[in-house]
């Protein structure tokens, strides 16, 4: 009996070790005395190339073009660009732009990405990426390569350089076999040796896998640990059990200007004040994502911070000065493909695909076709996450959307209002839309006028919130920042790290924060 229990415990222990290959000293198939043993371990410990869930590394398996380029890019500290389709498309594009390979060697159709990478191409990518200044002497180095004639001309230089610097060595017969595949163990050697020519591999710039679901520190009242994955039933937003939920919280101001207020401490504060929702306003124009793609990392970090606080979180493609969403539909589809890959297993996420269409756009002409395109991109990755869709006139034309709705599940229409500008007429549109069966989400509203200033209009805001509460419509207030404008919830100088008391809140903030958990 005791023996049996011991054996069982032992077996369990083994299994556990097998599940954590990176922390485990030995891969099951990497012998201590293998020539690649140390390099494989170094690559795996630094997160450059990991083994498999079953505890194996599979050192003799060929590495694919996408894998090799990704590992090289990590070692070189190159970040992926925006992408859609293949998991490595962003890295492949960035590598192409760097000139590590030419488009005809690995066409962007992606068909060859998952094929074993030819050794000559691997040598070229590694040398261009990691040791661009190394030069190889034709006369001495070509001597070392028995099958030099098999090498294509465009690979002479990087292969000669790689031999000269000791990145490559021939096999026992002195052959390079330029068109054959490279094993995973060889890939470790090539990348490490090339990287060591210039100070060693960089720390990986990107987590190897899409962010693992982050664990919340403290549960949020009405948050994700309580309500789980959202679903839309009829016009009502519901929790995982099909019971109605109302989300109430704050939108960031433009992440490019006030991203510091999306800190862990700020979001913890927001939660303590009773909110269960945060919105990440990633401007596309005005110095936003379309001119500075690094804003994506900032936006993702803000989403992660909200996830950690157990808040629901809206990722907002904040079009404003660029009022026609169709103008950047491709970029939006790429952005949301990546976002949905990253967050499809994270029940906190809501995707807002176009903040406020405006200018010369109509629902059926531009916004609806745009939405169809971007929703398809999201749905290819995340079949269920809630998607919020704007409408013309700064997301005030929900009646038009309701008359010509989108197909699909878990789609809601956003209505935006500013209490100093918009009143009963816009409230009536909500009732019109709901009557037509269109679910409504107020993903942005302000206590100010529509320009973010004036007022504050607290009486009008109260009328609005009472109206929304009666209909269980969720809302998000503009904005969580300390800018000197009346719509800002914080007084100028408030600490971006949170811990706010009453004195830190503006007149707008005090009113809005008092309504997070109200049901009056
Ligand atoms: C929305 C936008 C939001 C904007 C607020 C307040 O725009 F979604 O980005 O925020 O409402 O206007 C403001 C900030 C300012 C900033 C400015 C430009 O508060 O600090 O300088 O964005 O980035 C709306 C909403 C409604 C209407 C017009 C606008 N409307 N608009 O009904 O006429 O033109 O910005």
Image: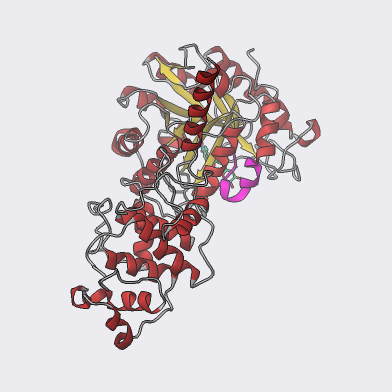
Residue 175 coordinates in the image, percent (x, y): 25, 72
Per the picture, the main secondary structure of the magenta-coloured stretch is helix
The span picked out in magenta is 252-263
Give the image location of residue 304, x and y in percent: 55, 38
Return the residue nearer the eye: 506 or 422. Answer: 506
Residue drawn at x 28%, y 82% as measured from the top left: 142
Residue 256 screen position, x and y as percent: 57, 50
* Color theme of the render: secondary structure
| Left or right: where 1 falls relative to 105 | right
Height in image: 452 above or below 163?
Answer: above
Note whether 242 is above or below 396 in the view shown. above
* Residue 499 belongs to the span the image colors magenta: no
Work out which quarter of the rendered image holds the C terminus and state it: top right
Residue with the most extreme bottom position: 139
Residue at the image position 31 percent from the left and 71 percent from the top:
170
Front in this rendered view, residue 168 or 249: 168
Q: Residue furthest right?
A: 503
């Amino acid at each position: 009996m005791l023996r049996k229990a011991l054996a069982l415990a032992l077996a369990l222990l083994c299994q556990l070790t097998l599940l954590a290959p990176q922390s485990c000293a030995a891969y099951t198939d990497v012998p201590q005395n293998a020539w690649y043993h140390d390099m494989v371990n170094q690559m795996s410990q630094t997160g450059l190339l990991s083994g498999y869930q079953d505890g194996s590394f599979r050192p003799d398996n060929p590495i694919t073009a996408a894998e090799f380029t990704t590992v090289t890019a990590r070692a070189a500290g190159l970040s992926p660009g925006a992408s859609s389709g293949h998991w490595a498309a962003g890295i492949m594009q960035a590598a192409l732009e760097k000139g590590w390979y030419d488009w005809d060697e690995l066409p962007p159709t992606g068909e060859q990405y998952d094929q074993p990478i030819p050794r000559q191409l691997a040598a070229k990518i590694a040398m261009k990426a990691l040791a661009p200044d190394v030069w190889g002497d034709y006369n001495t180095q070509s001597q070392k390569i028995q099958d030099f004639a098999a090498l294509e001309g465009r690979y002479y230089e990087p292969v000669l350089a790689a031999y000269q610097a000791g990145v490559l060595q021939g096999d026992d017969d002195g052959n390079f076999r330029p068109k054959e595949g490279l094993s995973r163990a060889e890939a470790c050697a090539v990348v490490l040796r090339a990287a060591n020519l210039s100070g060693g591999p960089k720390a990986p710039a990107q987590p190897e896998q899409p962010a693992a679901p982050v664990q919340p520190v403290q549960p949020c009242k009405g948050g994700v640990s309580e309500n789980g994955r959202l679903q839309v039933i009829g016009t009502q937003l519901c929790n995982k059990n099909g019971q109605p939920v109302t989300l109430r919280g704050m939108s960031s101001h433009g992440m490019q200007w006030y991203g510091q207020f999306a800190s862990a401490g700020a979001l913890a504060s927001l939660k303590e004040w009773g909110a269960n929702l945060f919105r990440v306003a990633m401007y596309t124009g005005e110095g936003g994502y379309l001119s500075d793609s690094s804003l994506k990392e900032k936006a993702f970090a803000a989403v992660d911070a909200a996830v950690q606080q157990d808040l629901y979180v809206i990722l907002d493609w904040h079009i404003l000065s660029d009022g026609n969403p169709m103008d950047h539909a491709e970029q939006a589809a790429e952005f949301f493909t990546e976002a949905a890959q990253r967050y499809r297993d994270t029940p906190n996420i809501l995707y807002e695909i176009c903040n406020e269409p405006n200018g010369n756009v109509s629902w059926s002409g531009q916004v609806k076709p745009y939405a169809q395109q971007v929703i398809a991109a999201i749905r290819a990755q995340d079949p269920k996450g809630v998607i919020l869709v704007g409408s013309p006139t700064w997301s005030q034309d929900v009646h038009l959307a309701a008359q010509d709705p989108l197909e699909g599940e878990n789609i809601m229409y956003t209505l935006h209002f500013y209490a100093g500008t918009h009143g009963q007429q816009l409230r009536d549109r909500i009732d019109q839309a709901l009557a037509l069966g269109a679910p409504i989400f107020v993903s942005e509203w302000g206590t100010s006028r529509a320009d973010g200033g004036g007022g504050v209009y607290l009486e009008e805001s109260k009328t609005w919130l009472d109206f929304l509460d009666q209909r269980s419509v969720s809302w998000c207030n503009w904005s969580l920042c300390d800018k000197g404008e009346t719509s800002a919830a914080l007084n100028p100088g408030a600490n971006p790290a949170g811990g706010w008391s009453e004195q830190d809140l503006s007149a707008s903030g005090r009113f809005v924060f008092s309504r997070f958990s109200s049901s009056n």
